[in-house]
Amino acid sequence: MAELNDLSLITQVAVFHNKRAFDQLVRKYQSPIRRFFLNQTLGDSQLSDDLAQETFIKAYVNITKFRGMSSFSTWLMRIAYNVHYDYVRSLHQTDDIDNSAAVRQSSSSGDSNLKMDVYAALALLKPDERTCVTLQLIDGYPIDQISKITGIPENTVKSHLKRGKDKMANYLKQNGYDR
């Protein structure tokens, strides 16, 4: 039923340029998209909002290209993934520089709550590992959907999940979390 409603709204936007219909789609999906970016940017809410806005602009401009081969949420998350990928690529930074800066930022805050520790653990992951882990553990996507969103083969997604979860578990154990 929800997918049928999405298709109705998408049709109204694509055919009639109905901005109110698009506003409904934005309201429905803005939280998951923003949460995705918060996890990818390790809690940078301003950057997350900017990337989310760019995602919805691209979705609006390209909505006539939606073919219904996957759910609208998967299509939209794929756009978000590409927006983030383009942003990271534009930085021209290596994983080592990104990760060490993020760990320094989270540890220098003096805030030892779980949220900051999780962001510090996420900072240790390679970008593809972080994406796969957050899409599964935080957003609840199954492996096949993660594969569609990222364009990464399912077995590679499984490998990223295993390595990412292991790295996070080790980091959290070393920092006083037993589970």
Image: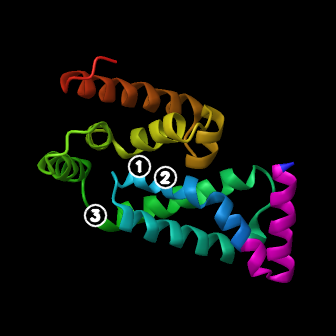
Q: Which numbered disc, 2 or 3, marks the residue that appears first in the sequence?
A: 2
**Residue ID at (86%, 70%):** 11
Percent of width and height locating residue 167? 30, 28
Say which of 30 and 41 sits in front.
Answer: 30
What x and y, as percent, mark residue 8?
Answer: 87, 64
Q: Position of residue 156 (x, y in %)?
A: 50, 32
Q: Nearer the viewer, residue 25 or 83?
A: 25
Label drawn at residue 39: 1
Residue 46 is a magenta residue: no
Query: How many numbered callouts?
Result: 3
Q: Determine the residue positioned at 68% across, 74% down.
A: 60
What kind of residue is marked 1?
Asn
Q: Is residue 19 magenta?
A: yes
Q: Residues within 10 Å of mark 3 (few under 14, many from 20)?
A: few
Coordinates of residue 69 in the picture (x, y in percent):
79, 51
Tell me the quarter of the picture where residue 168 sits.
top left
Give the spatial CA distance, label 1 vs label 2.
6 Å
Q: Is residue 46 depicted above or below 102 in this figure? A: below
Residue under circle 3?
92
| Picture layout, residue 39 above or below residue 24 | above
